[in-house]
Amino acid sequence: MSGGAVSHEEEVKQMGFWKNVTFAAIPLCIGVAIWDLSHAHAHDHEQIQYPYMHIRSKDFPWGPCSLFDTHCWEEQKEGHGEEE
């Protein structure tokens, strides 16, 4: 056997090495992700409000607000409370 023949013991040793690397890398990656996601990221510029953005000719099936527009939903709730 010539070339890249590797004994069983060497394969087990390599498997153990990469198993340890994996066990060390997983908590490291989770820690970096938690640290990164826990800090607010500032935006350097404001979004330009182009005239063609947010143009609707009719309401959505669930009402006049976009699905994730919390400010609009709060205004709608306040408006309903005053009508009753």
Image (cartoon, grey):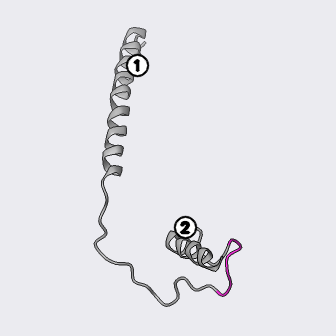
Q: In which quarter of the image is residue 47?
A: bottom left
Which is nearer the N-term, disc 2 or disc 1?
1
Give the residue at x 55% y 67%: 68
Label 2: state its secondary structure. loop
Instruction: Say if mark 2 contacts mark 1, CB within 8 Å.
Output: no
| Quadrant (top left, top right, bottom left, bottom right) of the N terminus | top left
Give the residue at x 34% y 78%: 46
Where residue 68 is drawn, which disc sits there? Answer: 2
Where residue 15 is drawn, which disc sits there? Answer: 1
Which of 28/68 is in front? 68
Q: How many labels does the image show?
A: 2
Whether 16 is drawn above or below 34: the answer is: above
Tell me if mark 2 has few (under 14), some (14-19) or many (20+) residues whose alpha carbon lies within 10 angstroms of its own.
Answer: few
Whether 71 is drawn above or below 33: the answer is: below
| Place of residue 34 in the rendered image (x, y in percent of width and height, measured from the top left) | 35, 44
The question of residue 54 being in magenta is answered with no
